[in-house]
Amino acid sequence: MKRIVILDYGLGNLRSVQKGLEQVGSSPAISGDPEEILAADGLILPGVGAFVDAMKCLAPIKGTIEEYARSGKPMLGICLGQQVLMSSSEEGKLTDGLDLISGKVLRFPKSELKVPHIGWNNIEIKQDHPLFEGIPDNSFVYFVHSYYVDTASENTLAACSYGLDFSASVVNSKGNVMGTQFHPEKSGTIGLKILKNFVDMC
């Protein structure tokens, strides 16, 4: 069985991601140990909370994550986990991210729409990628976020609209580092299929 590690860095709903992966036949480990991370066939970076807190917590293993990304093995950031893959965030002044994918994290502008963006919304799949294998365009997935990712079209796997268009799923140029702004583990059968696709990539 493929060894999938859910990164434990002090922030994130680790158990719900673990349960989602178990539902698609994986047996993931939860770990923050650099040796275990580097030995994994697949790495998941979950996250709930503030960007600046996440980067502080990730500081001790930042080099390990960068080394893992360079290995070409699949890595998936979920929600805040997608945001920290980017170059920077304007949350809590300007904070540098892991810069594994070029782009910025911005706050939704003031409008008649409620922030945070919470609930089900449909996504427009922008490019062929194994993560979205068999996922119909305009599928509904579950979001909870006040900040969104702004990146180039070549780094956008799927887009979503909430007052403006934003990157609902991102990818690096190599295709192995991916993120979803939405929560696949809370997105029903569509989300489980995306997690299964990730496991199959590993």
Image: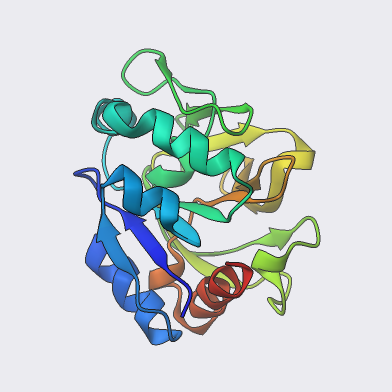
State the quadrant of the C terminus: bottom right
Residue 135 appears in the picture as rendered: yes
Q: Is residue 114 visible?
A: no
Give the x, y percent position of residue 167.
Answer: 62, 45
Judge from the rendering whether residue 104 lies leftward or rightward of residue 61; answer left or right: right
Question: Residue at left 60%, top 75%?
Answer: 200
Outermost residue to the left: 10
Position of residue 168 relative to residue 195, above or below, is above
x and y, in percent, of residue 14 in the image? 26, 61
- Left or right placement of residue 66 versus residue 144 in this view: right
**Percent coordinates x, y for residue 90 in the rendering:** 43, 20
Vertical comparison of 62 with 190: above or below: above
Between residue 99 and residue 127, name the one nearer to us: 99
Q: Which quadrant of the figure has residue 10?
A: top left
Q: Residue at x 62, y 40 (%)?
A: 164
Q: As rendered, which of 64 and 46 lies closer to the eye?
A: 64
Q: Answer left or right for 58 relative to 190.
A: left
- Total numbered circles: 0
Q: Which sits in the foreground, 74 or 140?
A: 74
Residue 127: percent from left, percent from top:
80, 57
Is 189 above or below relative to 100?
A: below
Kindly identify the residue that appears in the image at 34 percent across and 58 percent down: 6
